[in-house]
Amino acid sequence: MSLVQRFAPDFKADAVMADGSFRELTLSEFKGKKHVLMFFYPFDFTFVCPSEIIAYDKAIPEFEARNVQVIGVSIDSKFVHFQWRNTEPKKGGIGPVKYPLVADVNHKIAESYGVLLPEGMALRGTFLIDKEGVVRHASVNDLPLGRSVSQLAETCPGTVSAGSHS
């Protein structure tokens, strides 16, 4: 069943923050403050992920202008996320991205969003969540299919407007 028009499942998990520090992150800390674009990807250090994750990073000013917090999630640990951030893109890393990477090591977040495969990895799920915590957009792609970050950024103004009618 789709999560659209339902409250997004909250979570509490370790994350590597935009400044490279570690801390526990919850979805609910953004409630009433920011819209959230949360995306899942299979693993750090994989062939499609770096270009997509770097594209999200390059679009951060556009998301920030729309009051949208970007959050990336995979089943890798915070230590693997940290290493990936500290590896330059030409060597297969992503560099210091300006948004949190959440470590879903117990797979509960991916499972609660319906993107966990039986093999234990996440599909490429994308969820746009309004300030009240309601999912306004959800899409799930198979592993080899990337996403268009520019299209997602263009979706945000409609989400902001839809959420402001209540």
Image (cartoon, helix red, strand yellow):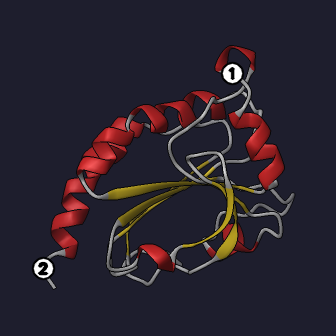
Q: Return the x and y of residue 5 as percentages of the image width and height.
A: 36, 80
The answer to whether 137 appears left or right of 86 in the picture is left
The residue most toward the left is 165
Please give the label number shown on residue 165.
Answer: 2
Which circle marks residue 88 in the picture?
1
Dot 1 surroundings within 10 Å: few (below 14), some, or many (20 or more)? few
Give the vertical position of 82 relative to 7 (above or below). above
Mark 2 residue type: His
State the SS at label 2.
loop
Nearest to the observer: residue 123 or residue 92? 92
Is residue 105 left or right of 14 when viewed as pictured? right
State the residue at coordinates (32%, 47%): 63
Name which quarter of the figure residue 15 lies in.
bottom right
- Looking at the rendered image, the quarter that the C terminus falls into is bottom left
Q: Secondary structure at mark 1?
A: loop
Report how far apart the C-alphas of labels 2 and 1 lie in the structure: 43 Å
Where is residue 3 drawn, in percent x and y?
Answer: 48, 76
Measured as percent of width and height from the top left, residue 118 is found at 84, 63
